[in-house]
Image: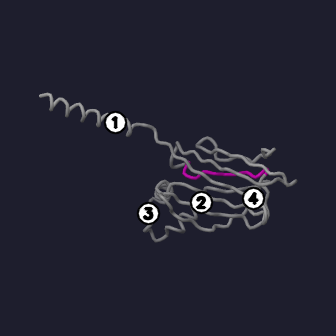
Amino acid sequence: MLKVLSKLLIALSLYSGLVAVATSPTYFFGLSDLTANPKTKHLEIIHQFTSHGIENAIAELKQINFSAEHKYYNLYIQQYFEQKFSLERNKIQIPLTWLGFEISSGKIIAYQESKQQNFLPQIVVKNAILIDTYPKQVNTVNFQGKDLKGVAFFGSLTFDYRRKEAIIVAQRDH
């Protein structure tokens, strides 16, 4: 009887642990780095998001089964990032060139850059990557570069379901 009771308690403990994990809130995080290359003055962007999250978002948007085996996998990944992330200055979109992406350790690491000279201050960043698919998604855009006077600055912007657009304001490096 003691063995049966002991096994029952262990089973109940495991079950309540599984229920706690299943009902606990799930948070999603994405990271983008936006750097003004000091030599070319071009903006270089590196995004890191879970590949599973991006694939689910595309599947939901296009109402398809979507995975790495899909015929248009690379194209749909590119289109998704181009639609969900953009930069503007003075209400004019800054053209970004898609350089490609790689998958590493369950993450999609995507690369973009501007071909024209750009400085970071006063750029409007629009970032809705995964936010429409996952209400608890939080995206961070870290930026670093120099202002028009050549003074270094850096900072971060945070995006979520309440905020999909923010402006870069210089925080001077003293």
Q: Earlier in the sequence, mark 4 or mark 3?
A: 4
- Residue 17: mark in rendering: 1
Residue 87, given in percent of the width and then of the height, sits at 71, 56
Q: Quadrant of residue 89?
A: bottom right
Q: Is residue 165 left or right of residue 10?
A: right
Numbered label tally: 4
- The kind of residue tagged 1 is Gly
Q: Would you name the residue on which mark 4 appears? A: 36
Q: Residues within 10 Å of mark 4 (few under 14, many from 20)?
A: many
Q: Quick check: 16 left or right of 145?
A: left
Which residue is identified by label 3? Answer: 67
User: Label 3 is placed on what type of residue?
Assistant: Ser
The first of marks 1 and 4 along the sequence is 1
Residue pictured at 46% horizontal, 42% vertical: 26
Q: Position of residue 151 (x, y in %)?
A: 84, 51
Of callouts 2 and 3, which one flags the residue occurring earlier in the amino acid sequence? 3
Q: Which residues are magenta?
A: 121-131
Pick whichever of labels 1 and 3 is earlier in the sequence. 1
Any mark on residue 81, and which?
A: 2
Cα distance in 3D space between marks 2 and 3:
16 Å
Q: Earlier in the sequence, mark 2 or mark 4?
A: 4
- Where disc 3 sits, the SS reads loop
